[in-house]
Amino acid sequence: MTTQPEGSAGKKGRLRSQDSMSREALEEVLKQTAALNPLTANGDQASLEALLAVARRYPGVEFQCEPVLVELVRAALGVQAGGGFQSEEQFGLIVKRVANELFANPETHARLNSLWQHLNAAT
């Protein structure tokens, strides 16, 4: 029997045993983040301000996973979760994982690229 090295994710998308987030929770976070469109949503001023703050920190930067999408996800999840993570390290790992999955998906990539362009135009 062959075992994978410790820390290996195995099949793409499968969580490692040390990951503190279930696949279902990750999928829910991905759906909520991908659906976030504060420029057209009514009443979510906190999310809009958090995302605009990212655009102000990175004016004119082309849409890319790091730092742009990572920081957008951090801002969006920070507002949504309200500090509900066990540690900053855990939060950072979740943010990077969500950003990588969103960036790799062509549909969400295009939507978030468009969101980034709108955020830049609004600053």
Image: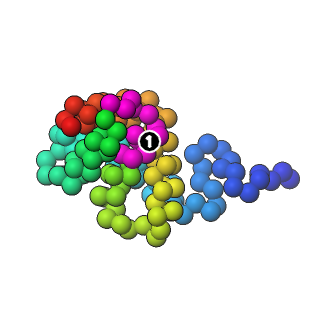
Seen as rendered, the residue at the extreme left is: 42
Magenta stretch: includes residue 107: no
- The amino acid marked with disc number 1 is Pro
Residue 82 image offset from top left, x and y in percent: 31, 65
Question: Is 11 situated left or right of 83 in this image?
Answer: right
Q: How is the image coloured?
A: rainbow
Residue 77 x %, y %: 35, 55
The residue at 17%/39% (across/down) is 40
Span highlighted in magenta in the image: 60-72
Dominant SS type (magenta): helix
| Residue 70 highlighted magenta (yes or no) | yes
Q: How many marks?
A: 1
For the point 26% across and 34% down, the residue is 120
Q: Is residue 111 visible?
A: no
State the image coordinates of residue 20 (x, y, percent, origin top left). Answer: 54, 63
Within 10 angstroms of label 1, few (less than 14), some, or many (20 or more) residues? Answer: some
Q: Quadrant of the C terminus?
A: top left
Q: Nearer the viewer, residue 11 or 91?
A: 91
Q: Is residue 59 above or below residue 28?
A: above
Identify the residue at horizontal 22%, vertical 44% (top origin): 38
Is 9 left or right of 116, judged from the image as shown? right
Q: Identify whether 20 is placed above or below 75.
A: below
Q: Secondary structure at mark 1?
A: helix
Report the residue marked by disc 1: 67
Query: Is residue 18 visible in this depiction of the protein?
Result: yes
Q: Image point 52% across, 55% down: which residue? A: 93
The picture quadrant where one finds residue 34 is: top left
Left or right, 54 with respect to 44, comes to right
Q: Examine the image and state in which quarter residue 68 appears.
A: top left
Residue positioned most to the bottom: 86
Relative to 83, say whether 14 is above or below. Answer: above
Residue 79: x and y, percent?
29, 58
